Amino acid sequence: MSSLIDQFLNIHKTRPIEEKDWQCLNDTQLMEMVLMLVMNDSVVQQSPSILSLIRILCWSEENNSTLATNEVFSIIQLNMSGSLQQDPQRQVYCCSALRGLAFKNNNISIKSHEVWMFNLLKNAMIIHQHHAGVQEQASGALRNLSSNETPK
């Protein structure tokens, strides 16, 4: 599964321009399935690429508030901490998930996690400063975070 997700993200580095190409991501059953997989620690440990599905689902802005939960943030934090932070590919997937969660998201949950997200991204970039994938996904997440407006 990891290779299929990686291949998809290599082909589609950013959200497709045409809405019809990403509108299918508004599927409730797909969201439930991905959340079920992400919340299952043993699945994430076996296939951390599952976290990248968060980024893909966030291409549909309607999904952002459903995905930006404390539980999802906890799973990402767990996978970016301790001995797991030494695994560069796992960091790519986590940074990719954060990149998606920060995409056009003015959700109050994102705002309350901004400093935490910034620190995780910064640590990943420092630890894996020579890993292009980590740098690409982390800088994309930082760009998305900085482009969000403060909710009024």
Image: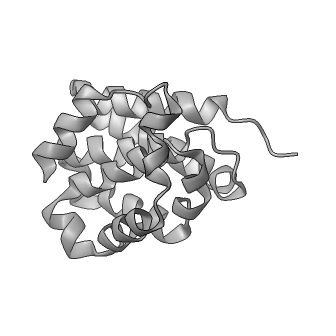
Quadrant (top left/top right/bottom left/bottom right) for the C terminus: top right
Total marks shown come to 0
Name which quarter of the figure residue 75 lies in. Answer: bottom left
Camera-side residue of 114 and 4: 4
Q: Is residue 59 left or right of residue 40?
A: right
Q: Quadrant of the N terminus?
A: bottom left
Residue 108 vs residue 134: left or right? Answer: right
Is 17 located above or below residue 81 in the figure? above
- In the image, residue 147 above or below residue 28: above
Vertical position of residue 62 compared to residue 21: above or below: below
Q: Residue at x 29, y 33 (%)?
A: 134
Residue 134 in the image: above or below residue 39: above
Q: x, y (%) of residue 116?
A: 55, 51
Give the quadrant of residue 63.
bottom right
Left or right: residue 74 compared with residue 4 = right
151 or 125: nearer the viewer: 151
On the image, the x and y values in percent for residue 142 come to 52, 32
Q: How far across and down, in percent of the image, does residue 112 sit?
A: 67, 56
Outermost residue on the right side: it is 152
Report the residue that reaches farthest toward the front. Answer: 20
The structure's colour scheme is: one colour
Name the residue: 21% across, 45% down: 5
Q: Is residue 27 left or right of residue 149?
A: left
Residue pictured at 72% horizontal, 56% vertical = 108
